[in-house]
Image (tube, rainbow, N blue to C red):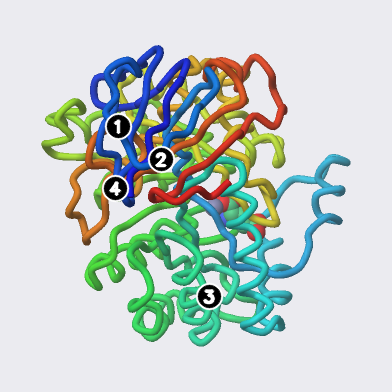
Amino acid sequence: MSTLITNIAELMTQDPEHRVLKDAAVVIEGERISWIGQASGAPAADDAVDAGRRAVLPGWVDSHTHLIFAGDRTAEFEARMAGEDYSAGGIAVTTEATRTTGDYDLTRLAQGRVAEAVSQGTTYLETKTGYGLDVEQEARSARIASTVADEVTYLGAHLVPAGMDAEEYAKLVCGPMLDAVRPYARWADVFCERGAFSEEQSRSVLQACRDAGLGLRVHGNQLGHGAGVRLAVEFGAASVDHVNYLSEQDIAGLAAGWTGWDAAAGTGRRGTVATCLPACDLSTRQPLAPGRQLLDAGVPLALASNCNPGTSYTSSMAFCVTTAVLQMGLSVHEAVRAATYGGALALQRESGNDVDGERAVGSIAVGHRADLHVLNAPSATHLAYRPGMPLTHAVWRAGVRAR
Ligand SMILES: N=CN[C@@H](CCC(=O)O)C(=O)O
Ligand SMILES: [Zn+2]
């Protein structure tokens, strides 16, 4: 079964050449893109869809979410808007609510959040554990996550549960909890921050998880300067996320990791992607991450929603893109790239058709997964030009019409 999407005013491919085609068309065959080019030269297909002179982008790749939770943190948000600081301790409130919610309800909640994201153009999505914080509950979160998300990250090292000794808990995270979660997860993460895990504790978690064969990610430099970025670079983590407080050495270290990387060919030694979470920065009233500075230094950037009940209760990638343009100094093309190709790079899904049997996501090219986002606008510029407007017109996810 093939579908021709034609009459596309602007096709922002986010491919290695950064091509933006005018008057374009795309053919989807099964779950893959089989042709792109000028509409006038499009081949015949079983089915045709008229895009009505709208813009088409790759679906958003949301590389950082925490969707496996129950409960509500409105009161904490209100207190923050009244001047309180964000602290990692709020995670305990969600942990309590999550532990006392049954599998069926927890799964339904997570499915609902994924559906919200997809209806706004997200077609590939990572999610984390981290609100279970004991062996059984973390394994349950990972199992549920594996049924709702494309990528699962083990975040047992999110907060030391009340009443537990930090060193004892870190041993649990590196031992029995890791064993229990391992079958469901591709990634491991650690919240390396004041009030969460120290540099040494983070180091032991990263080491154990790497030894167990998990890819690494780090929550780092969110609330102040610290060791997160440095550790992420040292361990060759795929991504370090938040990156609000960076020293010159942090930025130089991230950039140095990519020397030898051929962005066009997608080959060579890869470094650590810097993932900015602007919705979280606004909700916690932190300074926005220095995305412009990172890009100028040559560090590949991702934008992600960080959807979670504490610091960023939104899955709107369009909101993140809009903020990145209006507040962080990115161009529309750069922001869309960070929210599509950048997310794929952070999840190491940006190229090749044979990684774990998966197709490349985050850009529009022949052979890639057919993840498309049709905007109700003639160009992607409208994402920033018309902030807050519901611009998602249609979504294809792995070749299936999802909206
Ligand atoms: N910073 C650490 N973890 C989440 C927030 C978790 C919470 O407060 O519930 C984040 O990425 O912002
Ligand atoms: Zn997070």
Q: Position of residue 270 (x, y in %)?
A: 20, 40
Which residue is tagged 2?
Answer: 47
- Compute the Cα span from label 4 to label 3: 23 Å
Disc 4 + disc 3, Cβ < 8 Å: no
Q: Nearer the viewer, residue 168 or 242?
A: 242
Give the residue type at disc 2.
Asp
Residue at 21% from the left image edge and 32% from the top image edge? 258
Give the mark, 2 or 4, whose residue is nearer the N terminus.
Answer: 2
Q: Which mark is residue 44?
A: 1
Q: Position of residue 50 (x, y in %)?
A: 50, 27
Q: Describe the element under mark 1 as helix, strand or loop.
A: loop
Residue at 56% from the left image edge and 19% from the top image edge? 325
- Compute the Cα span from label 4 to label 1: 30 Å
Q: Nearer the viewer, residue 36 or 182?
A: 36
Q: Nearer the viewer, residue 255 or 238?
A: 238
Residue 192 visible in rendering: yes
Residue at 25% from the left image edge and 38% from the top image edge? 34
Indicate yes or no: mark 2 CB to ligand 2 under 8 Å.
no
Which residue is tagged 3?
Answer: 141
| 108 relative to 349, above or below | below
Q: Is residue 233 left or right of residue 268?
A: right
Which residue is tagged 4?
Answer: 349
